[in-house]
Amino acid sequence: MLLSKIMTSFHNYERQWVCQFDRNADIYSFAFLSGARDFEANILYFGGISELPEHIPNMHLTFVCVRDQELPAEYPGAYLSSINLIVLDEHAKQMEILRILTQLFGEAARISSGRSHLIEVLHASQGLQAIIDKAYEILQNPIIVVDNSYRLLAMYRDDTVVEDRADLEEQRALGYMLKSNIDAMNRAHIYEQARARRYPLYNKDPEAKHGWITALVYIHGIEVGQIGVMDSRHPFTHVDFELVDFLCKAVSLELQKSDFYRTNQGLMHSYLLSDLLDNQAHDSSVIEQRMANLGWNLTANLYILLLADSARNFFDGKAQLITQQLHHLMPDSRWVIYHGQIVFLTRFDDSSRLTDNEELSRYLSINGLQAAVSNRFDDIISIRKYYSQAAKAYEFGHRLHPGQPLYFYADYFFYHMGQIVSEQHEIEDFYHPGVVALAAHDRAHGTSFLETLKLYLTYIDQPAVVADKLFIHKNTVFYRISKIREQFCLALDNGDERFKIHMTVKLMELNRT
């Protein structure tokens, strides 16, 4: 569970983030600060400020404390930046906080258990009805699944007739939703709201006894059906919404069991990679066992390659062709369709085989595709972070250099840093004043000093390359750089100054797009 999500449950109390390592740290459980000796990452330690340890291990830890005394001024010393420390106001009652944490992790356990049971049935390949039977056991409320023509694909099986809802059995016998029910949902704009939310939607007609959760099922971004769950046995909580949302994904995967997924060596390969990307797989021993069962030998020199299609048109046949062809270029890889893009987990012992892969770049260009690549990593549990790197590389690459077929996060990480800084500060505050004056001169006089400076800093000691890219003579490059030095007082022969100048040029480039 994300730390940020946990903290929203304490909205009735004033919260102070004394130090913050990662607001979105994954928290698996909680423990009392009192008496804690062997601390672990990913555990939330709860207690009073008076119970904080005097010496903190050199690791990432999370503490949530009630202000039962003032925090020592220099606490926690050398590791101030490596922990999350949240202090709640003195009015917070520890028993109430304990109740909230217990409820949160209890609900998280129910969600995790429900997902695991659904996955087991999905992997057993017993069909869609078996998945809905298991979902009915978990949710304990009637469930209906229909396709876009309102044809019944699966329905809960129970001899108990829901009071005042004989239409449910009528639909079971007919094999389709009743027109009166469809018309009622259209009048209430249920489908439009569900599409806008992309998350299960609850609605209850004022004259009806029970309400329904409506959730849409997608395959690669295409709507293929809907799931309805009625609150006839017990009212819904947010746990039900989370489980119905996951049920949509399970139904989607069940409907996709075709040659398309078999080309990826079976559904379980796709599902393991999806679990890793979704941060749903945390236990390293379980991951290793699942990898061993599937014959994965992906333990070092790993990369995420995210493949995007400008038409966002990855249908089964097209994706199958692309992945088969790319598998020849990246034989030691696994892939999955994820958020409408093809995501490869691949391995290269020599990074130059990826960064200088002309064949890959040529294939992407010919087929109108673009790809982004993360930094190298060795711990597969960290895959989500590197997927985010690839996504950022694509975001900035597509903005700044839209014509390129291949973007590497190593080339765009600075823009990512700038974006993070700009969320809390005016990015212009970090500009070098000399570069600001130079840019103003360009705008006023139509000169190209800024572009010349950018290329000069990029291709150090290569004036011929700079001249070639600007379509000017090499001597003109020397003349412009001389003017830049003198007129704008830019010390290009000083390393620190050159770094500040180059940083400003890049931040300006980011800010212009």
Image: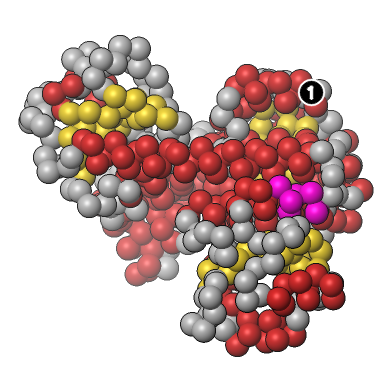
Residue closest to the eye, 506 or 178:
178
Q: Quadrant of residue 378?
A: top right
> Coloured how?
secondary structure
Decide whether residue 475 is among the magenta residues.
Answer: no
- The mark tally for this picture is 1
Q: Residue at position x 47%, y 43% from top?
A: 107
Q: Residue at position x 44%, y 61% from top?
A: 512
**Residue 26 location (% of width, % of height):** 45, 35
| Range drawn in magenta | 128-134
Question: Would you place residue 89 above or below residue 314 in this image?
Answer: above
Q: Residue at position x 53%, y 41% from top?
A: 110
Question: Would you place residue 484 above or below residue 55 in this image?
Answer: below
Residue 343 as seen in the image, left or right of residue 32: right
**Residue 495 location (% of width, % of height):** 35, 30
The residue type indicated by label 1 comes to: Asn
**Residue 305 location (% of width, % of height):** 69, 40
Residue 44 as seen in the image, left or right of residue 453: left
| One can see residue 491 in this view | no
Residue closest to the eye, 362 or 488:
362
| One can see residue 136 in this view | yes
Mark 1 neighbour class, 10 Å CA radius: few under 14, some 14 to 19, many 20 or more? few
Residue closest to the eye, 91 or 459:
91
The residue where tag 1 is placed is 293
Decide whether residue 133 is among the magenta residues.
Answer: yes
Q: Quadrant of residue 157?
A: bottom right
Q: Residue at position x 80%, y 70% from top?
A: 172
**Residue 270 location (% of width, % of height):** 76, 40
Judged from the image, the secondary structure of the residue bearing numbered disc 1 is helix
Dominant secondary structure (helix, strand or loop) of the stretch shown in magenta: helix
